[in-house]
Image (tube, grey):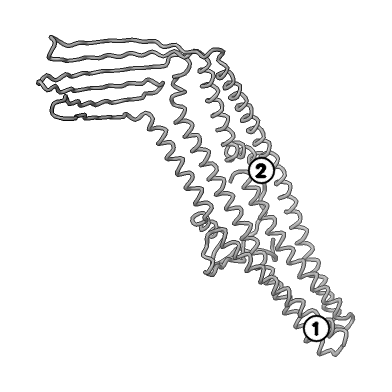
Amino acid sequence: MPGHGLRAAESAPLTLEDVQTFALEHAPGLERQRLGYDNLIQAVEIARSRFDPVFRAAREWQDSSDTQRTEGSVRQLLPADLDARANATLQEGTDGNDVTTYALQLSKTLLGGGTLAESRFPVEQARINEAREWNRLSLEQRRLRLTVTRQYFDVVRNQRTLQLRELQLERARLNLEHALVREDPLDIATARLRVPESELDVVSTQRAINNGLLTLKNEIGFPMQEPLEVSPEIAFEIRELDMDADLEKALMDHEQILNARLEVDLAQKELRIARTRRLPEVEARLSLQSRDDPRIDGRETDTRGEVVVSWPLGNRRDRAEINRKEADLKSAEIALYQAESERRRDIGSLALRVMEAEQTVRLQEERVEVLEQQLRLFQDRWENGEIGILEYIRSQNSLEDARVQFVAQQLRYMELLAEYDFSVGR
């Protein structure tokens, strides 16, 4: 807007971008959330460690008259719950005859579980939890930027107001000097009353700036004992909104939508696993054992196969579990629908508020221009002795208050625009 309000800062101690960057690096609350995300990264590694091979070694002895035993084994759990174990045992006899035994065992659940999806579910669940936490961290970072923006604008609003209030105080003192020259008792009393009122406005605005800076310091993690200076100059511009494109982006990229989709994905996986478990549990086991004993002629080899069937009478637990997972899936789908509806509602509502704020700024600018013309007319009439100073001061106050409102409405428009971007997912 030409001639009024906020202007682009040529040089400033800290810009809004500077403050946001500092907050993202030092805000205590955000740092705690990052630690939570790091923990979930480790949870993925813990879940993946389920498929790590396990080596075990044991050495057994008592006294010289007893045999000594050395044993080593390796266990490898593979996807689809294929459990493989290899074992080697050396038993040292006191007569010099050592017995060596090798064994291989394989077991696999064929029905009622043991699917590839079920065996990988702990890892996939950990990854989904990590992705959800990343989305929450991203949302918290954007929310922090929005909060900092609001607090920054609040300080700037008061800084700009202070400039206008100080100008108002200067004019009040100048009016008093002019009234004293004219020696009109009513004009003198009116002008003298306006001076302390303007001084009080200046003090009140200064206190608001200090309180705002303290709040901003606390939010961004800035040392409370150190001074913080922000620029009162901000570039103001009207931005056209593209609601259709913004809504499409929100439905694709907003963290709440992404997490709602992950909840549906997780519920679908859990339901599929629950349905595989309703069948009778059938487990197949195969074991191969070779025994080398010098006390007998040759090597003994034993092969053994086993099939175990287990099915709880009535199978009530598995049926109830399926019902629970079906309800969880429906609940997750409803939550996704609600999240999408909230995005549509919030973006539509904020777009209307942004457009209303834009119109308010335009109308307020026109009001300031009219009051400037009015003040020039009243100033001429007062200098010509046609009116008293009371009407002249009222005209000054109306213009100064309108300028304060103009700055506030510009910043309110920018704040609403920041809220709109946050709702979209920027």
**What is the number of the mark on residue 192?**
1
Q: Give how far across and how far down residue 219 sits, in percent.
A: 57, 58
The residue lying furthest to the right in this view is 386
The single residue placed furthest to the left in the displayed view is 96
Q: Nearer the viewer, residue 301 or 147?
A: 301
- Front residue of this view, candidates 149 and 293: 293
Q: Secondary structure at mark 1?
A: helix
| Depicted 177 relative to depicted 228: above or below | below
Confirm whether residue 343 shows in the render. Answer: yes
Residue lying at 36% horizontally and 21% vertically, measured from the top left:
83
Kindly identify which numbered label has been placed on residue 401: none
Residue 45 falls in image quadrant: top left
Element type where label 2 sits in the image: loop
- The residue to which callout 2 is attached is 242
Amino acid type of the residue that numbered disc 1 sits on in the rendered structure? Arg
Q: Nearer the viewer, residue 194 or 26?
A: 26
- Percent position of residue 149, x then y: 61, 56
User: Is 109 rendered above or below residue 190?
Assistant: above
Q: In which quadrant is the N terminus drawn?
A: bottom right
Q: Is residue 58 left or right of residue 133?
A: left
Which of the two discs, 1 and 2, sits closer to the camera? 1
Where, by quadrant of the figure, is residue 229 drawn? Answer: bottom right
Contact? badges 1 and 2 (CB < 8 Å): no
- Give the quarter of the image for residue 288: top left
Asked if one can make out residue 11 in the rendered structure from this viewpoint, the answer is: no
| Disc 1 to disc 2, C-alpha distance | 53 Å
Residue 104 x, y percent position in the rendering? 28, 18
Q: In the drawing, does residue 151 fall left or right of residue 168?
A: left
Q: Amino acid at mark 2?
A: Asp
| Residue at 46% from the left image edge and 23% from the top image edge | 118
